[in-house]
């Protein structure tokens, strides 16, 4: 963890604890870290999971890579150094939400294992779930909804993951989604099933419940 430059600071302890919030929500806070190539289906699946969670009364939020770069990380580009800082900042944001009992869904390419490992390391045990959205480069290029791969092949986008910059696939993700072999709805359903099986969700009506 990076030491703060500020001095004379201390951590504030809130009156409402994480456990208080989780018992109220009927869920355990967690960061679901979706990683994969551009156009692999990360945002589509994350948003479907978010919708499914809302329908059952759960508290969740989606942190999308492009959206974050419009605000919090608008000063960062796509160099290796900027990618690392991009992931560091969003990791800290995800941690804050998670510690308040929220199910956080992050949809970032996050191409480097070391950066994802650091994102995991700053969280408490069980607070970080790596989800590899596995889709071959050829299929991502075929989809290419925004024409980014075509631009990268033409040299118009430098340092583009999968073309002119590397992507390091997870070695031991908690969950692998094959977005060629299953529909986005099927992938989202598998994420919900994982949350249920691992006691991140324990009651559909949520209110004032707690795990057995």
Image (cartoon, grey):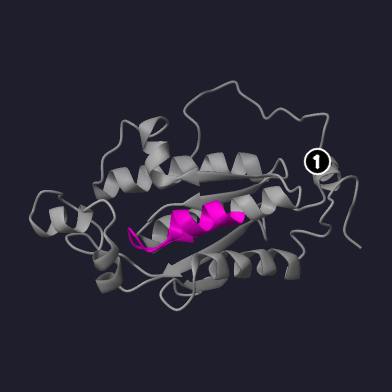
Reply above or below: 121 against 5: below
Front residue of this view, candidates 158 and 137: 137
What residue is rendered at 42% in x and 38% in y? 68
Point out residue 138 in the picture as x, y percentages from the top left corner. 25, 73
Q: Residue furthest top?
A: 8
Quadrant housing the C terminus: bottom right
Side (left or right) of 106 relative to 74: right
Point out residue 18 in the picture as x, y percentages from the top left corner. 78, 42
Side (left or right) of 103 relative to 71: right
Reply above or below: 5 against 26: above
User: Where on the picture, by quarter, is residue 72?
Assistant: top left
Front residue of this view, candidates 76 and 147: 147
The magenta region covers 32-49
Front residue of this view, candidates 146 and 134: 146
Q: Can residue 123 be seen?
A: no
Reply above or below: 76 against 171: above
Front residue of this view, candidates 172 and 157: 157
Point out residue 50 in the picture as x, y percentages from the top left corner. 60, 51
Q: Which residue is mark 1?
A: 21
What residue is rendered at 80% in x and 45% in y? 25
Q: Is residue 35 magenta?
A: yes
Side (left or right) of 29 relative to 81: right
């Amino acid at each position: 963890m990076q030491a703060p430059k500020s001095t004379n600071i201390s951590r504030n302890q809130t009156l409402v604890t994480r456990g208080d919030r989780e018992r109220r929500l009927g869920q355990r806070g967690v960061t679901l870290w979706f990683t994969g190539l551009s156009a692999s289906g990360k945002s589509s699946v994350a948003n479907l999971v978010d919708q499914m969670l809302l329908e059952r009364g759960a508290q969740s939020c989606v942190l999308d890579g492009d959206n974050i770069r419009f605000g919090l990380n608008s000063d960062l580009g796509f160099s290796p150094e900027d990618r690392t800082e991009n992931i560091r900042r969003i990791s800290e944001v995800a941690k804050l939400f998670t510690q308040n009992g929220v199910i956080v869904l992050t949809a970032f390419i996050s191409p480097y294992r070391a950066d994802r490992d650091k994102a995991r390391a700053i969280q408490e045990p069980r607070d970080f779930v790596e989800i590899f959205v596995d889709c071959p480069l050829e299929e991502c290029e075929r989809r290419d909804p925004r024409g980014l791969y075509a631009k990268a092949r033409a040299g118009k986008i430098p340092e583009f993951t999968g073309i002119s910059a590397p992507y390091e696939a997870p070695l031991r993700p908690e969950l692998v989604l094959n977005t060629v072999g299953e529909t986005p709805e099927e992938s989202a359903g598998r994420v919900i099933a994982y949350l249920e099986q691992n006691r991140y969700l324990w009651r559909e009506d949520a209110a004032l419940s707690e795990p057995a």
